[in-house]
Image: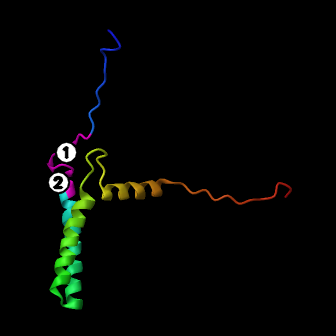
Amino acid sequence: MDNENEKLYIPYGLSTEQELFTGFGKREMKQCAVGIAAFGILAALLYIITAQVGAIIFTLLLGISGSIMMCRKDRNTRISVIGQIANMVRFSKGQKKYRYVYKSSWL
């Protein structure tokens, strides 16, 4: 066959899991629910301390939008912020640390 006719097309941005919308599937939904629940607890504590409704609303809106942004995967790299942080932690745990002690060659 001709080498010119043999072209390899590699698709990018494919997902192996079913998604609710681009970059957001069931796994991301669970992570997002945990984040929203954490911000809900923070909002409740803030309300107990300050007794201001505005602080609760701001904290909840910030928590919802922040959780969605941190959990949603990029369409090209298929990595989310939380996924990247998990990769960085896994990488740092896998690194071996060798501590060398200098000794004189004459001793």
Does the magenta run of residues contain 5?
A: no
Looking at the image, which is closer to me, 56 or 105? Answer: 56
| Residue where numbered disc 2 is placed | 26
Q: On the picture, is 50 further left or further right than 98?
A: left
Looking at the image, which is closer to me, 5 or 86? Answer: 5
> What stretch of residues is rendered in magenta?
13-28
The amino acid sitting under disc 2 is: Lys
Where in the figure is residue 54, as x and y percent of width and height? 17, 83
Q: Residues within 10 Å of mark 1 (few under 14, many from 20)?
A: few
| Residue where numbered disc 1 is placed | 17
Where in the figure is residue 30, as x and y percent of width and height? 19, 60
Query: Measuring 18% from the left and 72% from the top, which residue is drawn there?
Result: 61
Query: Measuring 22% from the left and 70% from the top, which residue is drawn there?
Result: 63
Q: Are marks 2 and 1 in contact (CB under 8 Å)?
A: yes
Where on the picture, by quarter, is residue 12? Answer: top left
Does the magenta run of residues contain 21?
A: yes
The amino acid sitting under disc 1 is: Glu
Q: Quadrant of the N terminus?
A: top left
What SS does tag 2 mark?
A: helix
Q: Is residue 59 above or below residue 32?
A: below
